Amino acid sequence: MSLHRFSRRTTTPPPVSGLLRRIAIPVRLCAMIIVLATASSTRAQPTTMSDPGSDAVIRRTDLGGTGPIDPQTQRLPDIMEMRLGRFTPAAPEIDRFNGVWDIAGAFVRIDIVLNGLVNPPGPIAFDDLFPIYDPFLYGPNPIFGYIEFDIDGDENTGGELSSPEVRYLGNVARFSGLPLEPRFSGRAAQDDTAFDGDITTAPFVDRSGEEFHIPLIGEEIDHFEVSLESPGGNPALFEAGEIWELDGDFFHRAHGFERFAFSCFSGNGKYKPETYLRFAHDIASDTTTISLVYPLQNAGSAALVSPTEPVQPNNGCAKVPGGGSEQNSVEEALDDLQFSATFADPIDRADPDFQLIAGWEFNSIATGQDPASWRVAALVGTAFSTMQSGSSRFIWTDVYPNPCVGDFNNDGVNDSADVAMLNSFIALADGDPSYDTDNNSTNGSLTWKGYARNFSLFDTNYDGIVDATDAVVAGDMDLDQLVDVLDVDDFIQALLDPGVYTATHNGRSPLVRGDLDGNGTLDGADIDEFTALVLGP
């Protein structure tokens, strides 16, 4: 089957300092969850990265913050886990997705597991030649976004120069905190002023370290095939229990390399091979798994054609102009980077943006082919019901790794230092028209300019107002900035039905204040700590 390619408040809140006098802010330790499969003398397969379920929230990007979305009928994409490692298909020329995780496999397999039924993305007018906006083409719950892979473990090589505002580092602060991993230190945008197009200025949002990414964008789909159709289903819609394979450009080398990669003359620095992305919904677990299986060397690319297909040497080209057979692989893409970095001319070397590729002159291509060591960053979301003005296309809903909500100084805990930092920022920006549009310099409240396109790290409840209520207090489940018996019912609701809690508490994830032991989940292990907070001073 083939489809067309589309080439407010009425009262002033008390100041934060007043809140500090009224309550004791408990320390909350934030945690990252990365589960590595047990290994003996060799690395086991695959590497699994877990993300707390039911933590999807609405993070708009439209200028007015009023773009239409109905979370009751439109699912918010919610990452549950990601898996990656070496993989061996049983018969790659027939079905690349049917096989086993294998430490000696010639392919990388990447699985992204999402909560519920999630549809492939439809076109969102990204293509100037075919500006069609139909995000719900394949169903009411589309997913959009980017999954980024740092292959060499070096955050200074690779990145996104043209559109960092739609990547992880450009949006993670929308989720009310900063990422804890050292590789992201000083790189996450705290507001829209970070996007200055200058790689040499902090925060270094352009320098994510990614070598490859999966673009979840409808314009990348050439056509799809239905591998498993639900009984009585609509062949044009992705429905419960179905499996689809999408054909398109789903594994891009980082665009920041394109100006400097030149071993493939016809490629213009790009490396965007045609490959397949599989969407599979499992009814029993009610999860959707997005999978990509891609060759690590050209030998794997040859095996996708037939067991006897001759292996082509690396030439840096992912495609043949006008069509034709051109083998491609991770190794070939990295070999091209090393060649280009090694033989770059002095003019390119003097360009500040050359920093993104410079390290590949000395990097190990072989080490880069170990998927179990790749570092991942993910940003996913959905789309507005109708196209918004300007460049607003996305409603972001989840990220990995998660930030520590309310941790403004990036030390991994919520404490009085973060509240003091919020207080200082409000005092500094109150009445400054660059940030505050309420024409009041003494109310201790910032009406953020250009919300929600122009976000702020300090707007933890993402309502366009930065004030005392944005302080995160562990155990404060009813959001009144106090920890007392009035929080008990809300804590129980969050514990038993986190979805209802989020729906009735301004979109707040119950983990933000309820995960008191910092293990990434709200469960019975948090009850004792919550009780101690309620009964304590």
Image: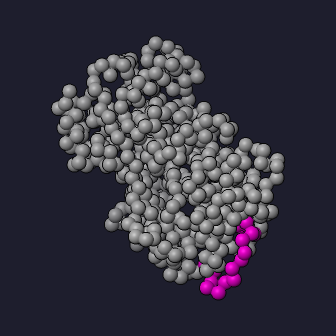
Q: Which residue is at a point 29% across and 32% down the rendered structure image?
A: 26
Instruction: Locate residue 513 relative to residue 124 in the image: left or right.
Output: left
Marks counted in the figure total: 0
- 170 vs 345: above or below: above
Depth check: 11 or 317 in front?
317
Q: Left or right: 536 with respect to 100? A: left
Give the extent of the magenta segment. Answer: 304-320
Kindly report the secondary structure that dominates the magenta region of the rendered protein.
loop
Q: Considering only vertical position in the picture, is 477 above or below 109?
A: above
Q: In the rendered image, which quarter is residue 386 located in? A: top right
Q: Quadrant of the N terminus?
A: bottom right
Residue 486 visible in the snapshot: no
Residue 25 is drawn in which quadrant? Answer: top left
Residue at 63% from the left image edge and 63% from the top image edge: 364
The quadrant of the picture occupied by the C terminus is top left
Is residue 503 or residue 169 the one in the foreground?
A: 169
Expressed as whole percent of the image width and height from the top left, the position of residue 153 reads 56, 55
Residue 56 x/y as whole percent: 41, 47
Would you say residue 308 sits in the magenta stretch? yes
The picture places residue 253, in percent across and down from the top left corner, at 65, 58
Residue nearest the viewer, comparing 365 with 187: 365
Residue beneath the point at 75% across and 53% down: 260
Among all residues in the image, which is located at the extreme front?
A: 41
Looking at the image, can residue 338 be seen? yes
- Image height check: is 6 above or below 12? below
Residue at the image point whose x is 78% and y is 44% from the top = 350
Residue 341 part of the magenta-drawn span: no
